Amino acid sequence: MESTVSQHTILPATSESDLVTARHLARGYSKEIGLGLVDETKLVTAVSELTRNAIVHGGGGSVCFEQVERDGRQGVRVTFEDHGPGIPDVTVAMLDGGSSTKSLGLGLPGSRRLVDEFELHSEVGKGTKVMIVKWK
Amino acid sequence: MSNPKPAMVRRSGEETAERYRMLIEQSDDLAIYLLSPSGHIETWNKAAEKLKQYKAQEVIGKHLSIFYTKEDQERKLVEKELEEAAQTGKFEGSGWRVRKDGSRYWADVIISALRDDDGKLIGFAKVSRDASERKRQEEIIEQQKQDLIELSTPVMQLWEGILVLPIIGTLDSQRSQVVMERLLEAIVSTGSEVAILDVSGVPTVDTMVAQHLMKTMEAAKLMGAECIISGIRPEIAQTMVHLGIDLSTVKTRSTLARGLEEALRTRQLAIVKSSRGEGAK
Amino acid sequence: MSVERIPILKMGEFLLVSIQTELDDRLAVNLQKELTARVAETGARGVLLDISGLDIVDSFLGRMISTIAEMTRIMDAETVVVGMKPAIAITLVEMGLTLPGVVTALNVEKGMELLRARTRASGEGDGIHSLSTYHTAGHQ
């Protein structure tokens, strides 16, 4: 079912200072919908993880934050996009410790466990797009 | 074109239309009205008048958004709902709506797209119902559920540096999470290095709950505290072993008393019998 | 770019690192370098890594903490990580990052007791909260 978006912010993800900004934005959006501290920490951590992926492995990209609502439920949706080399085998990348790059080990499967929705699209040579949602 | 239409008792078109009109007119609690493709109100029934307090002449020709809250108007919610109905044939949802006098009610809404034989959109039929009472009940139940969870997970400080959390009743995933968070918070606020989770009042443990317990212990360990599980009943022991849950790194004790004994030992304390009856020191 | 640095304090035979600022990747890498240098320089017997000021620890920082602990251990200085917030602990466990091999304590005081106990029972790493040191440590 479609969810409605009430506000959004788009952030470039190219340098390490963007990583810090992304964490702050994630915190701000969590507070906006009144997430509990544990859920807030989970979302901020997932955002940190995936933003770093976009910067380090994707060669930079963008992060889009949205406050969404579905069936009267508030949520934060974050979309990470990069134009990097892409992930050849998504299934393997989603396994614990199954990534080719060592530092990616827990990044993808780990952040999936921190959020309520997780979608990953990747095309070799074109880039990777990850969308996560945390519901209140 | 010979569309396979459902077999029906044939009536004259006018008769059927009249019956439908009456049905809609007489409907008491379902506000039913037609909208133009752009979302402007074309018909109005009694129930709609009763629910929204507007008379037919006041609303016909007006846009549907007049019933929506200001925030929903700003978010263009009407347009989004109509678009979904147009695309998928039907929109179903709930939300706050505004009466003529400005008061709000919780509405259950169905918007169906109406198309002519060529498939062209000719408007929408909207059915809406006051579900405020149901919403209120749901909120009360949710609140009570929360209260109950809070009440049923008391974290107690049994001794300096020792916490006890007796868990009573069935643990579901939501409750396990609350248990976990409260225990960890209490570990910090009381500076306790040992926590005993007593599960003798828990009838069954499924994989989810067992995992929650394990996660709680791992989280406590990361914070610098240790957990002891006491009171694992035979059925639970069987389930846990069958589920393949690795308990080799977990301290378990048969009863709360034994758990306490172990906790005291960890803290280099012991309960000794006083020869003169002064009590434990 | 910030030229911020994490202060490393010497407390007797131990080093105290208290992270009170948001730890970005660069700061974390610098800390790792400086800390190992200081351990070598001072011959410290233990390191207290106070992370009570941290609001998040992602896999990068988690690994950084593990690495610091491992490096100092090789240099004969045990690292005790203290003050991890519950929300962070829950998040790390959920991610599957349980920092195996990292010794933890609730706060700086308890961490200090633990380090004293461990260095006293030196040689054997597994110094389970040595009985004799608990009370004396509390009255400093």
Image: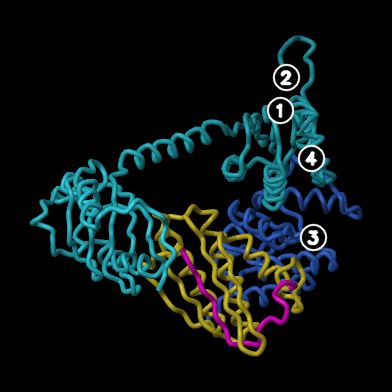
* In the image, farthest residue toward the top: B276
Classify mark 1: helix, strand or loop.
strand
Find out whether residue A77 is within the magenta segment: yes
Q: Are marks 1 and 4 in contact (CB under 8 Å)?
A: no
**Label 2 and label 4 in one chain:** yes
The residue indicated by pointer 2 is B280
What's the distance in space between the residues labelled 3 and 2, CA to CA?
37 Å
Q: Residue furthest right?
A: C123
Residue nearer the viewer, C32 or B103? B103
Q: Residue at x 23, y 41 (%)?
A: B28
Image vertical order of residue C37 relative to residue B182, above or below: below
Residues under numbered marks 3 and 2 in contact, where contact means CB atoms less than 8 Å apart = no
User: In this rendering, do the residues under marks 3 and 1 share a single chain?
Assistant: no
Residue sitting at x 80%, y 72%: C40
For disc 4, the chain is B
* Residue that numbered label 1 is attached to: B200
Asked if marks 3 and 2 fall on the same chain, the answer is: no
Q: Which residue is mark 4?
A: B240
* Residue behind mark 3: C78
